Image (cartoon, rainbow, N blue to C red):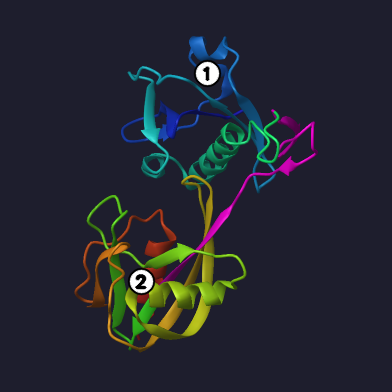
Amino acid sequence: MQTYVFYNDRLLLRKAGEHRCRIPDESELPKDLADRPLPSHEVLLPNGNTIRTLAIDHEVNEGADWQMTGLRASFDYLPISEYKAAGKAFQILWWDRHSRFCPVCGTPTEQRAPIMKKCPACGYEIYPPISTAIIVLIRRGRDEVLLVHARNFRGTFYGLVAGFLEPGETLEQCVRREVHEETGLQIDNITYFDSQSWPYPSGLMVGFTADYASGTIKLQDDELSAGAFYHRDHLPELPQKLSIARRLIDHWLKERP
């Protein structure tokens, strides 16, 4: 069985050639891991396959056979199916670590199902949380797109307006609110594009497209450090291919008649 081993958010990879890696099978793990009792879960994937994931308390020494890399960076080394599986595995470990005690009465919880824990004292049930966020590509005419640099971006690239869903909102209401709060703009023609699991640590990104309607850009200073409409022929550095932001931008670039 494939085994996804994490130290915090760093994933253990088996080297398989130059700049290529794979997830190890359980029988291949370093002996000091195979012989120790470690927090472990069997994880059912959307395709019906089952994997194993476990958390370790130290990094594995790298060498000719092994490499440890951040979950984001593993996108560059793994097949997409294994990268997605690693995302779910990490979310299960994150949930396990953050649900050891009942948030109602403080009693240690008991795992009753693969993705359910229950408090033996008050009966409160805990499931892996999913934080829903929207991300939106805003067009102005045929050739311009709004790109922003958020203060929490890990790099110099420009991306899209995004933000978390609030209680009581529809997704479309969240799109309008986030765009107006962060840029001061009004938009029309909000259209669903796609969604993406975002395991950093436990999110779902829901992508939309929209059209600029009115307003002048006024950036929310505590969220964004820069933002402007860019012509498709003169774009700044863009997000990595792993993100739905990049898929939205690439899709828009292909729409040109």
Q: Say few, some or many: other residues with alpha carbon within 10 Å of mark 2 (under 14 / 14 to 19 / 20 or more).
A: many
Q: Viewer-proximal residue, 151 or 92?
A: 151
Q: Which corner quadrant of the image does residue 250 belong to? A: bottom left
In the image, is 33 to the left or to the right of 139? Answer: right
Q: Is residue 236 visible?
A: yes
* Magenta region includes residue 36: no
Tell me the kind of residue under disc 2.
Glu
Element marked by disc 1: helix
Give the CA distance from mark 2 to mark 1. Answer: 49 Å
* Magenta region includes residue 110: yes
Q: Which mark is residue 182?
A: 2
Tell me the kind of residue under disc 1.
Glu
Q: Is residue 256 visible?
A: no
The quadrant the C terminus occupies is: bottom left
- Residue plotted at (42% across, 65% down): 162
Q: Which mark is residue 144?
A: none
Q: Which corner quadrant of the image does residue 113 belong to? A: top right
Whether 133 is drawn above or below 91: the answer is: below
- Residue plotted at (60% across, 73% down): 170
**Rendered location of residue 68, percent (x, y):** 38, 28
Q: Viewer-proximal residue, 69 or 124?
A: 124
Question: Which residue position is annotated with label 1?
Answer: 28
**Rendered location of residue 178, percent (x, y):** 43, 72
Marks 2, 1: nearer the viewer = 2
- Residue plotted at (68% across, 36% down): 102
Q: State which region is magenta.
A: 108-136
**Rendered location of residue 185, percent (x, y):** 36, 82
Element marked by disc 2: helix
The quadrant the N terminus occupies is: top right
Q: Viewer-proximal residue, 16 or 178?
A: 178
In the image, is 76 to the left or to the right of 192? Answer: left
**Rendered location of residue 253, percent (x, y):** 34, 75
